[in-house]
Image (tube, rainbow, N blue to C red):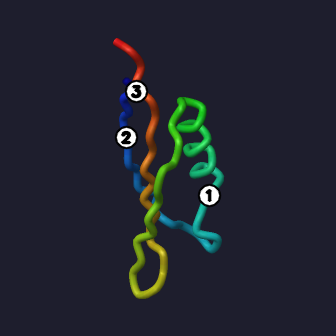
Amino acid sequence: MNTYEYKTIKIESKGFFKTTMENDQLLNEYGAEGWMIVSSFAEQINGITSAVYYTFMREKEAN
């Protein structure tokens, strides 16, 4: 039977475009480690996105 593990991270919005190349690099690193984004949620304050939460999932390695 397959089992899975999960991880949630928070990336805060910064700058005019609200993202940075470091954020893309971080998401690509998780992808290279086998993590897949299964959901994301934007945290908003007064209608402005202040952060995005990403939940990742990957299959657990057999012991």
Q: Is residue 60 above or below residue 43?
A: above
Give me the residue at 39% from left, 81% from top. Answer: 45
Q: Residues within 10 Å of mark 3 (few under 14, many from 20)?
A: few
Circle 2: element type: strand
Q: CA distance from mark 1 to mark 2?
A: 24 Å
Q: Amino acid at mark 1?
A: Thr
Residue 53 point in image, percent of width and height: 42, 59
* Badge number at residue 2: 3
Residue 7 point in image, percent of width and height: 38, 42
Q: Amino acid at mark 2?
A: Tyr
Is 30 left, or right, of 56 in this rendering? Answer: right
Give me the residue at 51% from left, 37% from top. Answer: 35
Which callout, 3 or 1, points to the residue nearer the camera? Answer: 3
* Quarter of the figure with residue 63: top left
Give me the residue at 41% from left, 56% from top. Answer: 10
Q: Amino acid at mark 3?
A: Asn
Are dots 1 and 2 in contact, CB under 8 Å?
no
Query: Which residue sits furthest top?
Result: 63
Circle 1: element type: loop
* Badge number at residue 20: 1
Which callout, 3 or 2, points to the residue nearer the camera? Answer: 3
* Badge number at residue 6: 2
Query: Which residue sits furthest bottom?
Result: 46
Residue 15 point in image, percent of width and height: 58, 69
Q: CA distance from mark 3 to mark 1?
A: 35 Å
Which callout, 1 or 2, points to the residue nearer the camera? Answer: 2
**Nearer-N-terminus badge (3/1):** 3
Q: Is residue 35 above or below residue 48?
A: above
* Badge number at residue 36: none
Give me the residue at 53% from left, 38% from top. Answer: 30
Q: Is residue 23 above or below residue 47?
A: above
